[in-house]
Image (cartoon, rainbow, N blue to C red):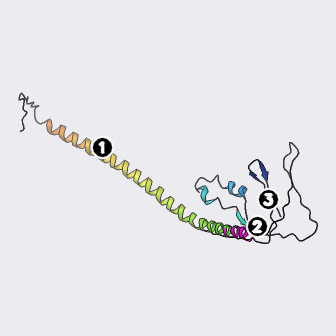
């Protein structure tokens, strides 16, 4: 069995489970690989590394465990801890239900991703259309206003300016 390490609190650790039930691993390395895609939101990739784990059961006897380190600058320091699982059917059931639900969510997200991307594309197209229509309307309104100004100016050129003074205190209407 092979397990990549993950940074947790103050240490980096890799947990290997040799249990009697089927389980899943969540590889963060696999997930981070897809975080660079700009188009697909990271929420769709968070469970990409959630895969069934090969369930190795350790028979009684002697076993060889190996640790590798890829630090060429200094020696790799590590600590191995072995724990025997205690019978805990309620916790195992919670783990199994949780992993089953997460597996279903992963499948649902994979299906929903294409629906989301299609809706996003339509939304972006609608946004672009709205922007283009708004710009066209603004141009048309500006052209309309300029045409009315020209129309008014052309009509006023036919008549001499006729200013009427208002000397009344109460004001007046025509």
Alpha carbon distance from label 2 to label 1: 66 Å
Whether 95 is among the magenta residues is yes
> Nearer the N terminus, badge 1 or badge 3?
3
x, y percentage for residue 121? 50, 59
Question: Within the image, what quadrant is residue 100 found in?
Answer: bottom right
**Residue for badge 2:** 53
Considering the whole magenta stretch, tell me its main secondary structure: loop
Mark drawn on residue 142: 1
**Residue for badge 3:** 15
Viewer-proximal residue among 53 and 125: 53
Looking at the rendering, the stretch of residues picked out in magenta corresponds to 75-97
Q: Is residue 21 left or right of residue 43?
A: right
Element on which disc 1 rests: helix
Question: Within the image, what quadrant is residue 17 found in?
Answer: bottom right
Q: Residue at x 14, y 36 (%)?
A: 156
Element on which disc 2 rests: loop
Whether 137 is among the magenta residues is no
């Amino acid at each position: 069995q092979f397990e990549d390490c993950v940074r947790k609190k103050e240490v980096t650790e890799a947990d290997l489970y040799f249990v009697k039930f089927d389980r899943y691993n969540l590889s963060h390395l696999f997930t981070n690989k897809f975080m660079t895609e700009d188009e697909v939101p990271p929420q769709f990739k968070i469970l990409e590394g959630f895969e069934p784990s090969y369930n190795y059961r350790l028979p009684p006897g002697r076993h060889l465990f190996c640790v590798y380190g890829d630090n060429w600058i200094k020696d790799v320091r590590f600590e191995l801890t072995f724990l025997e699982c205690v019978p805990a059917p309620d916790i195992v059931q919670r783990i199994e239900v949780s992993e089953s639900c997460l597996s279903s969510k992963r499948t649902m997200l994979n299906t929903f991703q294409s629906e989301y991307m299609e809706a996003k594309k339509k939304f972006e197209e609608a946004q672009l259309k709205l922007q283009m229509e708004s710009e066209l309307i603004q141009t048309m309104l500006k052209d309309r206003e300029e045409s009315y100004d020209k129309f008014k100016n052309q009509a006023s050129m036919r008549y001499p300016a006729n200013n009427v003074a208002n000397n009344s205190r109460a004001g007046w209407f025509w």
